[in-house]
């Protein structure tokens, strides 16, 4: 039976209409949680090194400095610009960063902020095993006794690397933390022999960690599927497309609340609120006047502070425009299973 011949034309129209209702994926701009526009110059100083690699501290700082210079609007100066300096050499008294000294040094160079941090992991590992080729070869034995296998050994190598950096972004005037974060990058290569050396695989892991840290410091774009006027919660997948969902655990670290706006909201006060549904209590609020600088707003909320304040359970994110409720979405914070 030809099933297509019994497909009603009206059904096809319904399906097309439903497909048309699916919101397109749009690029949304994720902004840092601090006012990055108030900063014009950043001093990048060496990172504290807690790894076994003596160069890891400068590697981490150098990669962040290069990324900031390439992708941010800030002027970037580094410890290398100071030349041989007792002030730079004394930043890590006893192996720990002296944040007050770092702030003074940055301020003396005309910087508004200091970027430094620590290398928590920076290592690679190469494993080796002997494998059999297991390639059948035809001969008389094969024909008489079934498949035979070439047991010539192959030297198989695998290289794995991990780089974990924590970051401290400090106000140069006060020494207070503006933003802190920690990210891990990994890389691997395998083969006989691998395409990359251990040093190259480790460098790729460091690149990955630095790129992830950068995205907490400067505006960047990710994709999400949001209809005009809707409000959604998204998982935090830095370097990957954001996924819209409604359940989060502390393993996520943070989530985003996303709304798509347009120029019709210019000049209007928008209030985004996150409330504990059971207690009917406010746990986070953002107030701003829409200035039409972008189509979409995304607000990052850290999960641990919310759990500490209101514990696990159901939450509601909602937003209003000039006091009129527009949209809301419910989500769950739950303990890891």
Image (cartoon, rainbow, N blue to C red):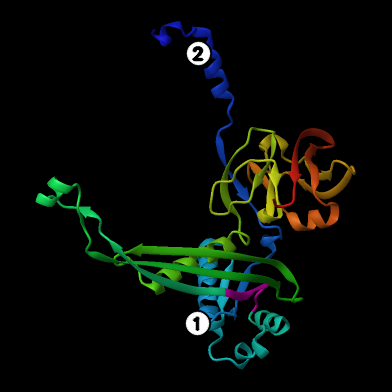
Magenta segment: does it hold 182?
no
Camera-nearest residue between 303 and 36 = 303
Residue 55 disc label? 1
Helix, strand or loop status at disc 1: loop
- In the displayed structure image, the side of residue 151 where residue 33 appears, left or right: right
Q: Residue 226's quadrant in the figure?
A: top right
Which residue has dot 2 on it?
Answer: 12
Magenta segment: does it hold 112?
yes
Residue 63 disc label? none
Q: Residue 309's quadrant in the figure?
A: bottom right
Sequence-wise, the earlier of marks 1 and 2 is 2
Residue at 22 percent across and 54 percent down: it is: 135
Q: What secondary structure prevails in the magenta region? A: strand
Q: Farthest residue toward the bottom?
A: 86
Q: Farthest residue toward the left?
A: 140
Query: What stretch of residues is rendered in magenta?
Result: 110-120
Dot 2: few (<14), some (14–19), or many (≥20) neighbours within 10 Å?
Answer: few
Q: Farthest residue toward the front?
A: 145
- Total count of labels: 2
Residue at 90 percent across and 44 percent down: it is: 279
Helix, strand or loop status at disc 2: helix
Camera-nearest residue between 293 and 103 = 103
Residue 311 pos. (x, y %): 82, 52
Residue 316 pos. (x, y %): 79, 40
Camera-nearest residue between 207 and 146 = 146
- 209 relative to 86, above or below: above
Residue 273 visible at all: no
- Disc 1 from disc 2: Cα separation: 63 Å
- In the displayed structure image, the side of residue 273 where residue 292 appears, left or right: left
């Amino acid at each position: 039976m030809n099933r297509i011949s019994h497909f009603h034309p009206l059904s096809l129209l319904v399906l097309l209409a439903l497909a048309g209702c699916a919101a397109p994926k749009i690029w949304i701009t994720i902004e840092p949680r601090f006012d990055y526009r108030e900063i014009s110059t950043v001093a990048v100083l060496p990172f504290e090194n807690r790894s076994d690699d003596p160069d890891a501290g400068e590697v981490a700082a150098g990669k962040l400095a290069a990324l900031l210079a390439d992708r941010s609007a800030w002027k970037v100066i580094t410890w290398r610009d100071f030349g041989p300096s007792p002030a730079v050499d004394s930043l890590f008294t006893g192996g720990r960063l002296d944040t007050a000294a770092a702030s003074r040094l940055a301020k003396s160079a005309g910087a508004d902020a200091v970027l430094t941090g620590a290398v928590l992991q920076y290592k690679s590992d190469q494993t080796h095993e002997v494998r059999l080729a297991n390639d059948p070869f035809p001969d008389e034995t094969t024909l008489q006794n079934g498949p035979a296998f070439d047991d010539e050994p192959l030297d198989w190598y695998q290289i794995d690397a991990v780089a974990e950096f924590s970051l401290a972004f400090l106000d140069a005037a006060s020494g207070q933390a503006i933003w802190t974060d920690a990210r891990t990058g990994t890389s691997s290569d395998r083969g006989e022999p691998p395409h990359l050396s251990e040093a190259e695989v480790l460098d790729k892991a460091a690149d990955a960690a630095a790129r992830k840290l950068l995205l907490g410091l400067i505006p960047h774009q990710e994709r999400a599927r949001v209809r005009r006027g809707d409000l959604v919660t998204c998982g935090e997948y830095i370097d990957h497309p954001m996924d819209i969902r409604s359940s989060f655990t502390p393993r996520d670290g943070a989530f985003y609340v996303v709304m798509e706006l347009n120029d019709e909201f210019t000049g209007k006060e928008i209030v985004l609120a996150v409330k504990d549904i059971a207690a009917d209590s406010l746990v986070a609020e953002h107030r701003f006047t829409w200035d039409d600088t972008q189509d979409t707003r995304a607000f990052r909320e850290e999960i641990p502070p919310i759990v500490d304040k209101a514990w696990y359970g159901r939450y509601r994110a909602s937003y209003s425009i000039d006091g009129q409720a527009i949209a809301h979405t419910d989500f769950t914070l739950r303990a890891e299973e």
